[in-house]
Image: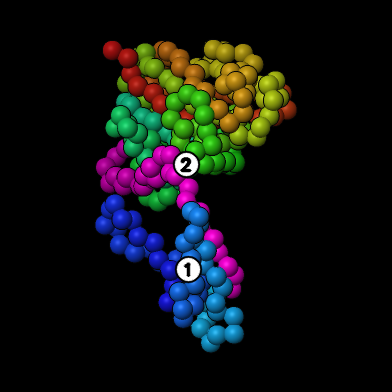
Amino acid sequence: YSAALVNVEKDTGLQLFGGTRPGCWNSMIPANGLLTMQESSAGCTCSYSLRTTITLKHKPQKEPGEWTVFISDQPTLPVSHMAINLGAPGDRRAPDGKLWVEHPKVGGNSADAPVTIEPANAAPFRLHSSTIKGDGLKWVAASGLRGVKSVQLKLEKKGAHRLRLHFLEPDELPARARQFDIVINGQTVQRQFDITASAGAPRRAVVREFKVDATEGAIQIDLRPTTRNQPILSGIEWFPLP
C-alpha cells in the first residue's frame, strides 16, 4: 500500500512512508545512491494525498536525535544544578549525563525550569545542529530566544556559583551588527558583547563563563543592547562552587 522505512541495525519496526502510492507494480527504484518513488496513483481509484514523484537521498545524522521529555511529579524548585536549553524542541541528556530542560515548554509536560525570562514572549529560533560549529554542545546553541532582556534564576544555595551562557548568531549578521552588555546581579561583566566577533563567524557557538556571588539565592542576568539588533541567548547552566 505504501513504502516503509526500517532500521536494519536496530529492531525498531516499520515506519510507514504514507501518502504516496508506489503503484500496483514496484515503482520504487534504488539507483546511484537514490531511491525514487514514481507517482502511480493518477487515474487510480486509491485515495493517496501526494500525487507526485519523490526521491530520497541518504543524509548522515551527525548527532543522535535523542530529544525527549523527562516528566517529574516531584517538586522541581529550587535546584542546585540546572541546564536550560532555550527554544529547544524537548529535553535532552548530554553525554556527561547532564539533563538540559527545554524552555519554554513545547515538547510536553517536562520538568519546570526555575527561570523567569523577560519579555515572556521572546521569539524562539531553531536550526539543525548539523549546521552549527564552534564551542560547546551544538544542539544547545542551535536554538534560542531573540530579544531577551533579563533572566532570573532561582537557586537552592546561596554563595558562589559558576554560570555559563551559551550564544549563537543565527541570522548571518556580521561583526558589530549585534552587540549588548552582559550584566549579572547589577555588575557589568562584559561590555558590547559581539557573538559573531567572539565566535569568529555567524552560526558558530560561543560560551561565556562567569563566577557569580549569589548572596540572595538568585542570579539576575540582564542583556542590554547597544545596537538595534536585540540580544540572543541559547542556553544557561549553573552550579554551586565548593
Q: Are marks 2 and 1 in contact (CB under 8 Å)?
A: no
Query: Which residue is found at the position 37% from the left and 50% from the top?
Result: 109
- Considering every residue shown, the one lying at the far front of the view is 32
Q: Position of residue 77 (x, y in %)?
A: 34, 34
Residue 201 vs residue 6, the one in the foreground: 6
**The magenta segment:** 51-77
Residue 200's quadrant in the figure?
Answer: top right
Residue 216's quadrant in the figure?
Answer: top left
Residue 71 vs residue 55, the one in the foreground: 55
Q: Position of residue 72 (x, y in %)?
A: 29, 45
Q: Amino acid at mark 2?
A: Ala
Give residue 28's mark.
Answer: 1
Residue 113 in the image: above or below residue 51: above
Give the overall secondary structure of the magenta segment.
loop
Q: Quadrant of the N terminus?
A: bottom left
Q: Amino acid at mark 1?
A: Met
Q: Quadrant of the C terminus?
A: top left
Query: Which residue is found at the position 39% from the left and 31% from the top?
Result: 83
Residue 36 vs residue 227, the one in the foreground: 36
Indicate left or right for 74 with 120 as reference: left
Give residue 16's mark.
Answer: none
Q: Earlier in the sequence, mark 2 or mark 1?
A: 1
Indicate left or right for 27 with 197 as reference: left
Quick one: SS at disc 1? strand
Residue 17 in the image: above or below residue 180: below
Q: Position of residue 60 (x, y in %)?
A: 44, 44
The residue indicated by pointer 2 is 88
Q: Residue 57: say if magenta.
A: yes
